[in-house]
Image (spheres, grey):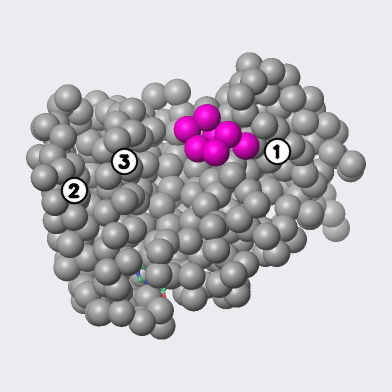
Amino acid sequence: MNPTILLLPGDGIGPEVVAAAVVVLRAVGDRFGHAFALTEAPIGGAALRRGLPPLPAETLQAAYAADAILLGAVGDPEFDRGDSSRRPESALLGIRRELKLYANLRPAKVWPGLENAGPLKPEVLAGTDLLVVRELTGGLYYGEPRGTDGDSAFNTMRYSRGEVRRIARRGFDAARRRRRRVTSVDKANVLETSRLWRQVVTEVARDYRNVALDHMYVDACAMKIALAPASFDVILTENLFGDILSDEAGAIVGSLGLLPSASLGDGRGLFEPVHGSAPDIAGKDIANPIGAIASAAMLLRHALQLDAEAAAVENAIGDVLREGLRTADLASAGGHPVGTRGMGERIAAVVREAGL
Ligand code: NAD
Protein backbone atom coordinates (compact mmCIF):
# COMPACT_ATOMS: atom_id res chain seq x y z
CA MET A 1 0.00 0.00 0.00
CA ASN A 2 1.46 3.41 -0.98
CA PRO A 3 -0.85 6.05 0.51
CA THR A 4 0.05 9.72 0.47
CA ILE A 5 0.12 11.40 3.86
CA LEU A 6 0.31 15.18 3.92
CA LEU A 7 2.27 16.56 6.87
CA LEU A 8 1.33 20.02 8.12
CA PRO A 9 3.84 20.58 10.95
CA GLY A 10 2.76 24.20 11.58
CA ASP A 11 4.14 26.21 14.47
CA GLY A 12 5.86 25.97 17.84
CA ILE A 13 6.19 22.35 18.94
CA GLY A 14 4.18 21.23 15.87
CA PRO A 15 7.28 20.41 13.76
CA GLU A 16 8.94 18.57 16.67
CA VAL A 17 6.00 16.31 17.46
CA VAL A 18 5.24 15.66 13.77
CA ALA A 19 8.90 14.68 13.22
CA ALA A 20 8.58 12.15 16.07
CA ALA A 21 5.36 10.78 14.53
CA VAL A 22 7.10 10.45 11.15
CA VAL A 23 9.85 8.33 12.71
CA VAL A 24 7.11 6.02 14.01
CA LEU A 25 5.24 5.96 10.66
CA ARG A 26 8.47 4.94 8.91
CA ALA A 27 8.88 2.09 11.40
CA VAL A 28 5.31 0.99 10.64
CA GLY A 29 6.07 1.13 6.90
CA ASP A 30 9.19 -1.01 7.35
CA ARG A 31 7.48 -3.59 9.55
CA PHE A 32 4.29 -3.97 7.53
CA GLY A 33 5.70 -3.33 4.04
CA HIS A 34 4.01 -0.02 3.21
CA ALA A 35 5.74 2.76 1.30
CA PHE A 36 4.01 5.80 2.76
CA ALA A 37 4.52 8.83 0.51
CA LEU A 38 5.03 11.71 2.92
CA THR A 39 4.60 15.22 1.56
CA GLU A 40 4.77 18.46 3.52
CA ALA A 41 3.18 21.91 3.23
CA PRO A 42 3.15 25.12 5.27
CA ILE A 43 0.22 26.19 7.42
CA GLY A 44 -0.42 28.82 10.09
CA GLY A 45 2.46 31.03 11.21
CA ALA A 46 4.87 28.90 9.17
CA ALA A 47 2.99 30.01 6.03
CA LEU A 48 2.72 33.65 7.16
CA ARG A 49 6.49 33.75 7.68
CA ARG A 50 6.91 32.84 4.01
CA GLY A 51 4.63 35.69 2.97
CA LEU A 52 1.70 33.33 2.31
CA PRO A 53 -1.81 33.35 3.82
CA PRO A 54 -2.30 31.09 6.88
CA LEU A 55 -3.95 28.45 4.68
CA PRO A 56 -2.23 28.77 1.27
CA ALA A 57 -4.12 27.54 -1.81
CA GLU A 58 -1.24 25.11 -2.53
CA THR A 59 -1.59 23.61 0.93
CA LEU A 60 -5.30 23.08 0.39
CA GLN A 61 -4.60 21.50 -2.99
CA ALA A 62 -2.07 19.16 -1.40
CA ALA A 63 -4.72 18.28 1.22
CA TYR A 64 -7.20 17.31 -1.49
CA ALA A 65 -4.52 15.24 -3.22
CA ALA A 66 -3.55 13.32 -0.06
CA ASP A 67 -5.17 10.22 1.43
CA ALA A 68 -4.82 11.65 4.93
CA ILE A 69 -3.41 14.68 6.73
CA LEU A 70 -1.33 14.83 9.90
CA LEU A 71 -1.18 18.28 11.49
CA GLY A 72 1.10 19.41 14.33
CA ALA A 73 -0.29 22.68 15.70
CA VAL A 74 -0.80 26.27 14.64
CA GLY A 75 -0.38 29.43 16.68
CA ASP A 76 2.46 31.90 16.85
CA PRO A 77 2.59 34.84 19.31
CA GLU A 78 4.26 36.95 16.62
CA PHE A 79 1.00 37.08 14.66
CA ASP A 80 -1.37 37.42 17.63
CA ARG A 81 -2.16 41.04 16.95
CA GLY A 82 -3.01 40.64 13.26
CA ASP A 83 -6.60 40.79 12.00
CA SER A 84 -8.45 37.52 12.57
CA SER A 85 -8.22 36.25 8.95
CA ARG A 86 -4.39 36.65 9.13
CA ARG A 87 -4.02 34.74 12.37
CA PRO A 88 -2.39 31.30 12.19
CA GLU A 89 -5.40 29.70 13.92
CA SER A 90 -7.73 30.75 11.08
CA ALA A 91 -6.04 28.08 8.95
CA LEU A 92 -7.39 25.37 11.19
CA LEU A 93 -11.00 26.51 10.90
CA GLY A 94 -10.45 27.00 7.16
CA ILE A 95 -9.14 23.51 6.47
CA ARG A 96 -11.86 21.89 8.62
CA ARG A 97 -14.50 23.85 6.72
CA GLU A 98 -13.01 23.15 3.26
CA LEU A 99 -12.72 19.42 3.89
CA LYS A 100 -16.23 19.35 5.45
CA LEU A 101 -15.00 17.55 8.55
CA TYR A 102 -18.20 16.95 10.49
CA ALA A 103 -17.04 14.27 12.91
CA ASN A 104 -14.50 14.86 15.64
CA LEU A 105 -13.15 11.80 17.45
CA ARG A 106 -11.30 12.31 20.71
CA PRO A 107 -10.18 9.26 22.66
CA ALA A 108 -9.16 9.52 26.29
CA LYS A 109 -7.55 6.54 27.94
CA VAL A 110 -5.34 5.92 30.89
CA TRP A 111 -1.96 4.66 29.70
CA PRO A 112 -0.05 2.06 31.73
CA GLY A 113 2.02 3.61 34.49
CA LEU A 114 0.14 6.91 34.28
CA GLU A 115 -2.73 6.06 36.64
CA ASN A 116 -1.38 8.76 38.98
CA ALA A 117 -0.85 11.44 36.33
CA GLY A 118 -4.41 12.81 36.33
CA PRO A 119 -6.49 14.52 39.01
CA LEU A 120 -8.61 11.44 39.85
CA LYS A 121 -7.83 8.67 42.31
CA PRO A 122 -6.00 5.87 40.44
CA GLU A 123 -8.70 3.36 41.38
CA VAL A 124 -11.38 5.61 39.80
CA LEU A 125 -9.34 6.16 36.64
CA ALA A 126 -8.31 2.49 36.26
CA GLY A 127 -9.58 0.93 33.04
CA THR A 128 -10.68 4.25 31.46
CA ASP A 129 -10.67 4.00 27.66
CA LEU A 130 -13.38 6.12 26.09
CA LEU A 131 -13.96 7.87 22.79
CA VAL A 132 -15.94 11.08 22.38
CA VAL A 133 -17.55 11.32 18.93
CA ARG A 134 -18.59 14.96 18.54
CA GLU A 135 -20.63 16.55 15.74
CA LEU A 136 -18.40 19.35 14.47
CA THR A 137 -20.17 21.45 11.84
CA GLY A 138 -23.72 21.97 13.14
CA GLY A 139 -25.65 22.98 16.23
CA LEU A 140 -25.34 26.17 18.21
CA TYR A 141 -21.94 27.17 16.79
CA TYR A 142 -23.28 27.51 13.25
CA GLY A 143 -27.07 27.89 13.55
CA GLU A 144 -28.83 30.91 12.04
CA PRO A 145 -30.16 33.36 12.98
CA ARG A 146 -27.55 34.60 15.38
CA GLY A 147 -26.65 38.06 16.50
CA THR A 148 -27.37 40.84 18.92
CA ASP A 149 -30.56 42.80 19.30
CA GLY A 150 -30.22 45.81 21.55
CA ASP A 151 -29.72 44.49 25.05
CA SER A 152 -30.08 40.86 23.96
CA ALA A 153 -27.92 38.39 22.09
CA PHE A 154 -29.08 35.16 20.52
CA ASN A 155 -27.89 31.94 18.90
CA THR A 156 -29.79 29.14 17.27
CA MET A 157 -29.38 25.43 17.85
CA ARG A 158 -30.53 23.58 14.77
CA TYR A 159 -29.97 20.01 13.57
CA SER A 160 -31.38 18.19 10.58
CA ARG A 161 -32.09 14.46 10.53
CA GLY A 162 -29.31 14.03 7.95
CA GLU A 163 -26.73 15.73 10.14
CA VAL A 164 -27.63 13.55 13.11
CA ARG A 165 -27.75 10.39 11.02
CA ARG A 166 -24.24 10.77 9.57
CA ILE A 167 -22.55 11.50 12.92
CA ALA A 168 -24.50 8.69 14.58
CA ARG A 169 -23.18 6.29 11.94
CA ARG A 170 -19.64 7.44 12.75
CA GLY A 171 -20.26 6.75 16.43
CA PHE A 172 -21.67 3.28 15.84
CA ASP A 173 -18.95 2.41 13.32
CA ALA A 174 -16.33 3.38 15.90
CA ALA A 175 -18.09 1.36 18.61
CA ARG A 176 -18.07 -1.74 16.41
CA ARG A 177 -14.26 -1.61 16.45
CA ARG A 178 -14.19 -1.11 20.21
CA ARG A 179 -16.31 -2.51 23.04
CA ARG A 180 -19.61 -2.12 21.15
CA ARG A 181 -21.32 0.38 23.43
CA VAL A 182 -22.65 3.82 22.51
CA THR A 183 -23.85 6.36 25.07
CA SER A 184 -25.75 9.06 23.20
CA VAL A 185 -25.68 12.32 25.14
CA ASP A 186 -28.37 14.99 24.82
CA LYS A 187 -30.71 17.19 26.82
CA ALA A 188 -33.94 15.68 25.52
CA ASN A 189 -35.88 16.70 28.64
CA VAL A 190 -35.50 20.36 27.57
CA LEU A 191 -34.41 20.75 23.92
CA GLU A 192 -36.31 19.93 20.70
CA THR A 193 -33.00 19.39 18.88
CA SER A 194 -32.13 16.79 21.50
CA ARG A 195 -35.45 14.99 21.03
CA LEU A 196 -34.76 14.78 17.29
CA TRP A 197 -31.20 13.66 18.09
CA ARG A 198 -32.48 10.86 20.35
CA GLN A 199 -35.05 9.73 17.78
CA VAL A 200 -32.56 9.56 14.89
CA VAL A 201 -29.82 7.90 16.95
CA THR A 202 -32.34 5.25 18.04
CA GLU A 203 -33.27 4.66 14.37
CA VAL A 204 -29.61 4.36 13.32
CA ALA A 205 -28.97 1.90 16.17
CA ARG A 206 -31.31 -0.60 14.43
CA ASP A 207 -28.63 -1.05 11.76
CA TYR A 208 -26.08 -1.95 14.43
CA ARG A 209 -27.70 -4.82 16.29
CA ASN A 210 -24.45 -5.88 17.96
CA VAL A 211 -23.83 -2.42 19.48
CA ALA A 212 -25.61 -1.53 22.74
CA LEU A 213 -27.10 1.96 22.95
CA ASP A 214 -28.05 3.98 25.98
CA HIS A 215 -29.07 7.64 26.31
CA MET A 216 -27.87 10.05 28.95
CA TYR A 217 -28.51 13.71 29.72
CA VAL A 218 -25.44 15.88 29.32
CA ASP A 219 -25.38 17.03 32.95
CA ALA A 220 -25.48 13.44 34.20
CA CYS A 221 -22.77 12.50 31.70
CA ALA A 222 -20.46 15.31 32.88
CA MET A 223 -20.83 14.00 36.42
CA LYS A 224 -20.27 10.37 35.46
CA ILE A 225 -17.08 11.16 33.51
CA ALA A 226 -15.60 12.49 36.76
CA LEU A 227 -17.04 9.73 38.99
CA ALA A 228 -16.86 6.58 36.84
CA PRO A 229 -14.98 7.28 33.59
CA ALA A 230 -14.27 3.59 33.00
CA SER A 231 -17.99 2.95 32.53
CA PHE A 232 -17.96 4.58 29.04
CA ASP A 233 -17.00 3.22 25.65
CA VAL A 234 -18.22 5.63 22.90
CA ILE A 235 -19.87 8.93 23.89
CA LEU A 236 -21.84 10.24 20.91
CA THR A 237 -22.94 13.85 21.11
CA GLU A 238 -23.61 17.17 19.39
CA ASN A 239 -21.20 20.06 18.91
CA LEU A 240 -21.47 22.15 22.09
CA PHE A 241 -21.88 19.21 24.48
CA GLY A 242 -18.99 17.40 22.77
CA ASP A 243 -16.74 20.42 23.01
CA ILE A 244 -17.14 20.50 26.77
CA LEU A 245 -17.24 16.75 27.48
CA SER A 246 -14.16 15.97 25.34
CA ASP A 247 -12.11 18.52 27.29
CA GLU A 248 -13.34 17.07 30.56
CA ALA A 249 -12.52 13.53 29.43
CA GLY A 250 -9.09 14.67 28.22
CA ALA A 251 -8.30 16.40 31.50
CA ILE A 252 -8.81 13.32 33.68
CA VAL A 253 -6.17 11.16 31.97
CA GLY A 254 -3.17 13.41 32.67
CA SER A 255 -1.15 15.56 30.28
CA LEU A 256 -2.56 17.47 27.33
CA GLY A 257 0.46 16.15 25.43
CA LEU A 258 -1.02 12.63 25.43
CA LEU A 259 -4.26 13.39 23.61
CA PRO A 260 -4.87 12.62 19.92
CA SER A 261 -7.81 13.53 17.69
CA ALA A 262 -9.31 12.81 14.30
CA SER A 263 -11.63 15.03 12.29
CA LEU A 264 -13.49 13.10 9.60
CA GLY A 265 -15.78 13.94 6.71
CA ASP A 266 -16.77 11.94 3.68
CA GLY A 267 -13.33 12.45 2.07
CA ARG A 268 -9.88 12.52 3.58
CA GLY A 269 -9.54 13.10 7.33
CA LEU A 270 -7.37 15.39 9.42
CA PHE A 271 -5.47 13.98 12.38
CA GLU A 272 -3.85 16.16 15.03
CA PRO A 273 -2.87 16.21 18.68
CA VAL A 274 -5.32 18.11 20.88
CA HIS A 275 -2.65 20.48 22.22
CA GLY A 276 -1.63 23.79 20.64
CA SER A 277 1.76 25.08 19.51
CA ALA A 278 3.02 25.53 23.11
CA PRO A 279 5.43 28.40 22.32
CA ASP A 280 6.67 28.26 25.94
CA ILE A 281 8.42 24.93 25.32
CA ALA A 282 9.04 25.04 21.55
CA GLY A 283 12.49 24.19 20.20
CA LYS A 284 13.68 22.59 23.46
CA ASP A 285 13.09 18.92 22.66
CA ILE A 286 10.87 18.57 25.73
CA ALA A 287 7.35 18.40 24.23
CA ASN A 288 5.48 15.14 24.62
CA PRO A 289 5.02 13.65 21.12
CA ILE A 290 2.57 10.93 22.21
CA GLY A 291 -0.52 12.98 21.23
CA ALA A 292 0.89 13.33 17.71
CA ILE A 293 2.01 9.69 17.54
CA ALA A 294 -1.39 8.48 18.74
CA SER A 295 -2.96 10.78 16.11
CA ALA A 296 -0.84 8.98 13.50
CA ALA A 297 -2.26 5.70 14.83
CA MET A 298 -5.78 7.10 14.38
CA LEU A 299 -4.81 8.09 10.83
CA LEU A 300 -3.73 4.52 10.11
CA ARG A 301 -7.01 3.16 11.49
CA HIS A 302 -9.59 5.66 10.26
CA ALA A 303 -8.10 6.98 6.99
CA LEU A 304 -6.18 3.97 5.72
CA GLN A 305 -8.12 1.12 7.39
CA LEU A 306 -4.83 -0.29 8.72
CA ASP A 307 -6.11 -1.63 12.05
CA ALA A 308 -3.18 -3.93 12.86
CA GLU A 309 -0.70 -1.13 12.13
CA ALA A 310 -2.64 1.31 14.34
CA ALA A 311 -2.72 -1.25 17.15
CA ALA A 312 1.04 -1.81 16.77
CA VAL A 313 1.66 1.91 17.36
CA GLU A 314 -0.71 2.08 20.34
CA ASN A 315 0.82 -1.04 21.88
CA ALA A 316 4.29 0.45 21.44
CA ILE A 317 3.22 3.67 23.20
CA GLY A 318 1.89 1.53 26.07
CA ASP A 319 5.10 -0.54 26.24
CA VAL A 320 7.34 2.52 26.32
CA LEU A 321 5.28 4.14 29.07
CA ARG A 322 5.36 0.84 30.97
CA GLU A 323 9.17 0.91 30.63
CA GLY A 324 8.98 4.25 32.50
CA LEU A 325 10.04 6.70 29.80
CA ARG A 326 8.67 10.15 30.66
CA THR A 327 8.76 13.49 28.89
CA ALA A 328 8.90 16.52 31.21
CA ASP A 329 5.10 16.94 31.41
CA LEU A 330 4.87 13.43 32.93
CA ALA A 331 7.76 13.88 35.39
CA SER A 332 5.39 13.71 38.38
CA ALA A 333 4.52 10.13 37.39
CA GLY A 334 8.14 9.06 38.08
CA GLY A 335 10.38 7.12 35.66
CA HIS A 336 13.22 8.01 33.28
CA PRO A 337 13.39 11.42 31.60
CA VAL A 338 13.41 11.47 27.82
CA GLY A 339 13.11 14.20 25.15
CA THR A 340 10.69 14.52 22.24
CA ARG A 341 13.06 12.84 19.78
CA GLY A 342 14.07 10.11 22.23
CA MET A 343 10.42 9.24 22.94
CA GLY A 344 9.63 9.00 19.20
CA GLU A 345 12.70 6.88 18.50
CA ARG A 346 11.97 4.46 21.34
CA ILE A 347 8.33 4.00 20.26
CA ALA A 348 9.53 3.41 16.67
CA ALA A 349 12.08 0.86 17.90
CA VAL A 350 9.38 -1.04 19.81
CA VAL A 351 7.14 -1.07 16.70
CA ARG A 352 10.05 -2.67 14.79
CA GLU A 353 11.04 -5.10 17.56
CA ALA A 354 7.46 -6.35 17.93
CA GLY A 355 7.56 -7.45 14.29
CA LEU A 356 10.73 -9.55 14.68
P1 NAD B 1 -1.15 24.80 24.29
O1 NAD B 1 -1.87 23.53 24.13
O2 NAD B 1 -0.21 25.15 23.21
O3 NAD B 1 -0.32 24.79 25.67
C1 NAD B 1 -0.96 24.73 26.95
C2 NAD B 1 0.06 24.23 27.99
O4 NAD B 1 0.29 22.85 27.80
C3 NAD B 1 1.42 24.92 27.88
O5 NAD B 1 1.96 25.07 29.18
C4 NAD B 1 2.26 23.94 27.11
O6 NAD B 1 3.63 23.99 27.37
C5 NAD B 1 1.66 22.59 27.52
N1 NAD B 1 1.74 21.61 26.42
C6 NAD B 1 1.00 21.65 25.27
N2 NAD B 1 1.35 20.62 24.50
C7 NAD B 1 2.30 19.93 25.16
C8 NAD B 1 3.06 18.77 24.85
N3 NAD B 1 2.89 18.09 23.69
N4 NAD B 1 3.98 18.35 25.74
C9 NAD B 1 4.15 18.99 26.90
N5 NAD B 1 3.46 20.09 27.25
C10 NAD B 1 2.53 20.55 26.38
O7 NAD B 1 -2.26 25.93 24.48
P2 NAD B 1 -2.08 27.52 24.58
O8 NAD B 1 -0.83 27.85 25.35
O9 NAD B 1 -3.36 28.02 25.06
O10 NAD B 1 -1.91 28.03 23.08
C11 NAD B 1 -0.64 28.23 22.43
C12 NAD B 1 -0.90 28.51 20.97
O11 NAD B 1 -1.46 27.36 20.34
C13 NAD B 1 -1.90 29.66 20.72
O12 NAD B 1 -1.45 30.40 19.62
C14 NAD B 1 -3.21 28.94 20.43
O13 NAD B 1 -4.06 29.71 19.64
C15 NAD B 1 -2.69 27.73 19.69
N6 NAD B 1 -3.58 26.53 19.73
C16 NAD B 1 -3.58 25.74 18.62
C17 NAD B 1 -4.31 24.57 18.63
C18 NAD B 1 -4.22 23.68 17.42
O14 NAD B 1 -3.36 23.88 16.58
N7 NAD B 1 -5.06 22.68 17.32
C19 NAD B 1 -5.01 24.18 19.77
C20 NAD B 1 -4.97 25.00 20.91
C21 NAD B 1 -4.23 26.17 20.88
**Relative depth, front residue between 143 and 256:** 256
Task: Identify the image quadrant of the N terminus.
Answer: top left
The x, y position of residue 4, in whole percent, is 19, 31
Report the amino acid beneath label 3: Ala
Q: Residue at x 49, y 56 (%)?
A: 109
Please tell me how crowded label 2 is: few (under 14), some (14-19), or many (20+) other residues with Cα within 10 Å. Answer: few
Residue of label 1: 184
Per the image, the residue denoted by label 3 is: 310
The picture quadrant for ligand 1 comes to bottom left
Up-down relation of residue 253 to residue 33 (above or below): below
Q: Which residues are magenta?
A: 175-181
- Mark 2 lies on residue: 354
Labels 1 and 2 touching (C-beta < 8 A): no
x, y percent for residue 216 = 77, 44
Q: Where is residue 43? Give x, y as percent.
A: 28, 49
Q: Quadrant of residue 126?
A: bottom right
Alpha-carbon span between mark 2 and mark 3: 13 Å
| 114 w.r.t. 203: above or below | below
**Of labels 1 and 2, the one closer to you:** 2
**Mark 1 or mark 2: whose residue is earlier in sequence:** 1
Q: Are marks 2 and 3 in contact (CB under 8 Å)?
A: no
CB of mark 3 near ligand 1 (< 8 Å): no
Disc 2 residue type (three-letter): Ala
> Label 1 near label 3: C-beta < 8 Å?
no
Residue 203: tell me if it is visible: yes
Q: Secondary structure at mark 3?
A: helix
Relative to 168, 104 lies left or right: left
